[in-house]
């Protein structure tokens, strides 16, 4: 391990994560990048003004879209603990729009879907975000989507193993 890698390892191990796991194992190859990435994630995960239930929902949506087993396994229990319903979690895992969402959860679904499909959000969605969660929270939501997409890409390239449970369901041909 280089001196830079040792410093990056020590920083992440002594922080709120407590260990070098998941995406940070491959990212340590570039210790400065890993340090900057993990600091962004530390802010988003531990200091964001976005409600934890909505934050975790956004992570599950990214995990589903990128078929990212580690993100799903790690964040699915956190989403449930933060108050996201089992029905929503199961629907996201199945790749289908949940039937029952409150206005904020619907907003998160719409932001993620619109960004994925059109690379933007509609004026209506932007206005709803201002009313339902606030514009600071919208920016942090979008940042979390980018952050967790980066982590998903890194882990997919590195073939990062995930814990056995809870596993992200395989998508069937009828899932959307």
Image (cartoon, helix red, strand yellow):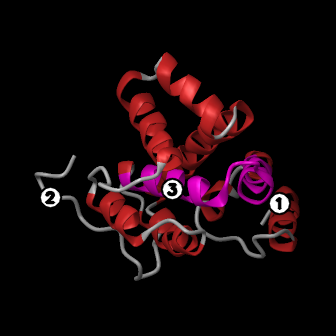
Range of the magenta residues? 37-64
- Magenta region, mostly helix, strand or loop? helix
Residue 94's x, y, as percent? 26, 61
Q: Earlier in the sequence, mark 1 or mark 2?
A: 1
Q: Is residue 93 left or right of residue 132?
A: left
Q: Residue at x 74, y 75 (%)?
A: 19
Q: Is residue 30 left or right of residue 107?
A: right
Residue at numbered disc 3: 57
Vertical placement of 147 versus 68: above or below? above
Q: Nearer the viewer, residue 95 or 65?
A: 95
Q: Residue at x 39, y 36 (%)?
A: 113
Q: Nearer the viewer, residue 55 or 171?
A: 55
Vertical placement of 44 versus 107: above or below? below
Q: Marks 3 and 1: in contact by CB < 8 Å?
A: no
Q: Mark on residue 8?
A: 1
Q: Is residue 17 magenta?
A: no
Residue 139 appears in which quarter of the rendering? top right
Q: Judge the density around disc 1: few (<14), some (14-19), many (≥20) Cα neighbours within 10 Å.
A: many
Q: Separation of disc 2 and disc 3 at Cα?
A: 21 Å
């Amino acid at each position: 391990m280089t001196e830079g890698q040792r410093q990056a390892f020590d920083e992440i191990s002594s922080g709120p994560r407590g260990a070098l796991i998941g995406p940070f194992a491959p990212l340590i190859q570039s210790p400065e990048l890993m340090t900057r990435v993990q600091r962004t994630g530390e802010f988003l995960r531990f200091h964001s003004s976005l409600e934890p239930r909505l934050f975790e929902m956004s992570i599950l949506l990214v995990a589903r879209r990128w078929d990212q087993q580690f993100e799903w396994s790690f964040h699915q229990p956190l989403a449930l603990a933060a108050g996201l319903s089992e029905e929503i979690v199961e629907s996201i895992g199945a790749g289908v729009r949940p039937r029952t969402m409150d206005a904020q959860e619907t907003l998160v679904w719409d932001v993620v879907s619109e960004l994925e499909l059109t690379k933007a959000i509609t004026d209506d969605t932007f206005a709803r975000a201002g009313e339902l969660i606030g514009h600071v929270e919208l920016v942090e939501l979008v940042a979390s989507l980018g952050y967790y997409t980066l982590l998903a890409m890194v882990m997919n390239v590195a073939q990062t193993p995930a814990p056995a449970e809870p596993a992200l369901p395989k998508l069937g041909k009828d899932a959307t």
